Structures are given as C-alpha cells and as structure tokens.
Image (spheres, rainbow, N blue to C red):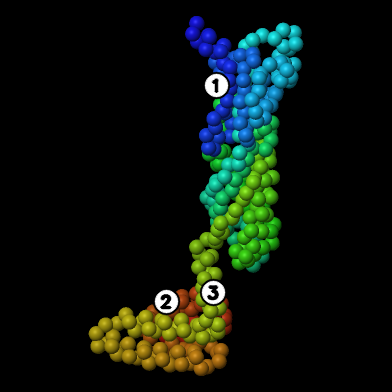
Amino acid sequence: MLDFLKKQLIDNIEWLESPGQLAWRVPFADHEIQNGAQLTVRENQIAAFMNEGKLADYFGAGLHTLNTANLPILTDLMHWDKGFKSPFKSDVVFFSLKEQPGLKWGTSQPVTVRDADLGAVRLRAFGSYSFKLNDIKVFVERLFGTLSEMTAEGLEPQLRSAIMTSIAVALGSSGVPFLDLAANQQRMSDTIKVEVDKAFAQWGLTCLTFFVESVSLPDEVQAHLDKGSSMRAVGNLDQYAKFQAAEALEKAAGQSGGIAGLGAGIAAAGALGSTMNQALSTPAAAPAAAPATLTEDPFALIEKLHKLLTIGALSQEEFDAKKGELLARLK
C-alpha cells in the first residue's frame, strides 16, 4: 500500500545534472506521473515527454504544471480528450544543452595523408575540442534510444573515431605542406573543425571548438628532416662530407691503445688537420681520399658513404669512385 501511495504522490520532477551528463531518464515507478505535478527545468536543460520511445512534448527552462493544457501532443496521442485519467504514464527525459569542454583527442595510429613536399606521410596529431547537444530528435533516434543515461565520456570513443576520419579528409585537401603547418595551425584547426562538425551533426551534436595542439611525423622521417636541417646549417655539402670523413678518422684513432694507439692518434690527427684544411680552403670537389693510416673496415666505410649518398651529401659519381677505391684495397 505504501509503495502504491509513493508512486501516486509524485508532484515535483527535476534534474540536478552532474558534469559530463548529456541525458537522463527519470526513474518513475511504472512511469506514472501525478496530474498537476510540477516540472522544474533549469537553464541549459530541456525536458521531453516520450510516448512509446518517440518524443512528444518539450519543456524549456522554467517551472511548469503538468496537465492536458501544456501536454497537447501527449494528450492527443493518449486520447485524453475522451477522459483524462490521473496519474498518467509517460517517460520523462532531461537533456543538457551545456557545452562539454576540455575533451582530448589524439591519433592512436598515424594518419596517412599526401603532403605537397614530402609525398605520402603518416602524421600523428593531438589536441582538444568541445561539443554540445544540438538536435534532440536526431540524438534520441541515433544514440540515446531507450537508455537510462548518456554521458560525454561514454560518447568519446565514437567521437574520436569521427575526428580521425575528419583529420584525414581535412589535411589531405588543405594543400598546406607539413613544414608550413606550424605557421598555419589556426587555419588547420578551423579546416578540421568544419569536417568534425559535419560528422557530429549525424548524431545531433555540434562541435563548438576544435584545437590542434601538435602534429608530428614518425621518428625515422623526422630524423631525415633533422639531418637535412643540419646539412643546410653547414652550408656547403662538399665541406660537410669532408667533415664527416674527418670525424670518422678521429673516431678510428681513438679506438687503438698503447704506443701503437698513440702513433695512430698522431697520424690521424695529422690527417684530420689536412682534411679540415682542405675542407675549408678548397672549393667543391670530389671527397678527399681517406689516409693510408685509416684502419676502419672498408665495408663499414662504404656503408657510411652510402648514407651520405642517401641524404644527398655525395653524388652518385663521387660515391662510385670512393667505393671503387675502397674495394681496391681488398685485392
């Protein structure tokens, strides 16, 4: 008897939402609401009455008294004009229209895009975004359905997937090379936001803010860019190649020990001085031949020379000539 009275005396309906909540279904016993009950809807909230899973009447911010006068759609659906019965049955769902801020996004896997300078590259990106509920009808049909509650946290995996697709579309069509992205970061954020907003609209959401905080290349690609930057800082590629050879001489000299190591170190130091002098005074020419005192494995030297060829520090002709010279030592 007590339970029966409790469910008949529901006279005030309200929602004290928690941060991150998007929607909440009021848990009435048997979904029965007292005729003349008070409905309190706060700012940035909408309360909706539902009949058999479909939205009927909406209530915005304010204090409302529930009766046939302000429930016209539900009254018509339930045929209350032929005899209103109290209490009545209906689902009541509250929706939050607040902005959901400070959400993070990031690429769990690199996104492949075609870059104007680098060709096809894989990018990683990270940033933040915010969204809010925009179209309740679409939101209910596509996401909420018969759930009792929905939060921003529960939606995040789905939203991040949409963001990843939007990033690939936006970056692939932006025409901004990777090396220029830092100077165009706001433009890139705005471009991606347009695509993200299109994706969110299919769920009745709108993207309010979208920020790209960092974009990076895979480590191996970044290493090649850093190498190229170092070469450009040196200026003359021929001098850079000679400097690399001098570093190899110094390293080889440091690997020997004792009296022999001292002699090798002196010889290497002399070779180092000669090499550096030629690098600084001789105009661009073929790399100087390695001194006879160099004891490093010719095959290892060839491998180093090939790396110089790969990054553009040596021409193919220079590489072939030096390779032939080193292989001749093996005969």
Question: Label 1 near label 2: C-beta < 8 Å?
Answer: no
Q: Extreme top residue here?
A: 1
Give the number of the mark in front: 2 or 1.
1
Residue 89 appears in the rendering: no
The residue under the point 52% across, 66% down is 222
Q: Position of residue 17 (x, y in %)?
A: 54, 32
Give the number of the mark in front: 1 or 3.
1
Q: Quadrant of residue 116?
A: bottom right
Question: Label 3 near label 1: C-beta < 8 Å?
Answer: no
The amino acid type, in three-letter code, at marker 1 is Pro
Q: Who is closer to the viewer here, 49 or 257?
A: 49
Left or right: where 68 falls relative to 235: right
The residue under the point 62% across, 11% down is 87
Left or right: where 219 falls relative to 191: left
The residue under the point 61% across, 14% down is 34
Q: Earlier in the sequence, mark 1 or mark 3?
A: 1
The amino acid type, in three-letter code, at marker 3 is Ser
Q: Earlier in the sequence, mark 2 or mark 1?
A: 1
Q: Is residue 37 above or below residue 43?
A: above
Determine the CA span between mark 2 and mark 3. Answer: 25 Å
Q: Position of residue 13 (x, y in %)?
A: 58, 22
Residue beneath label 1, please?
27
The amino acid type, in three-letter code, at marker 2 is Ala
Q: Earlier in the sequence, mark 2 or mark 3?
A: 3
Residue beneath label 3, please?
229
Left or right: where 136 falls relative to 231: right
Residue 259 appears in the rendering: yes
Q: Position of residue 148 (x, y in %)?
A: 56, 26
Name the secondary structure under disc 3.
Answer: helix
Q: Quadrant of residue 22?
A: top right
Residue beneath label 2, please?
300
Give the number of the mark in front: 2 or 3.
3
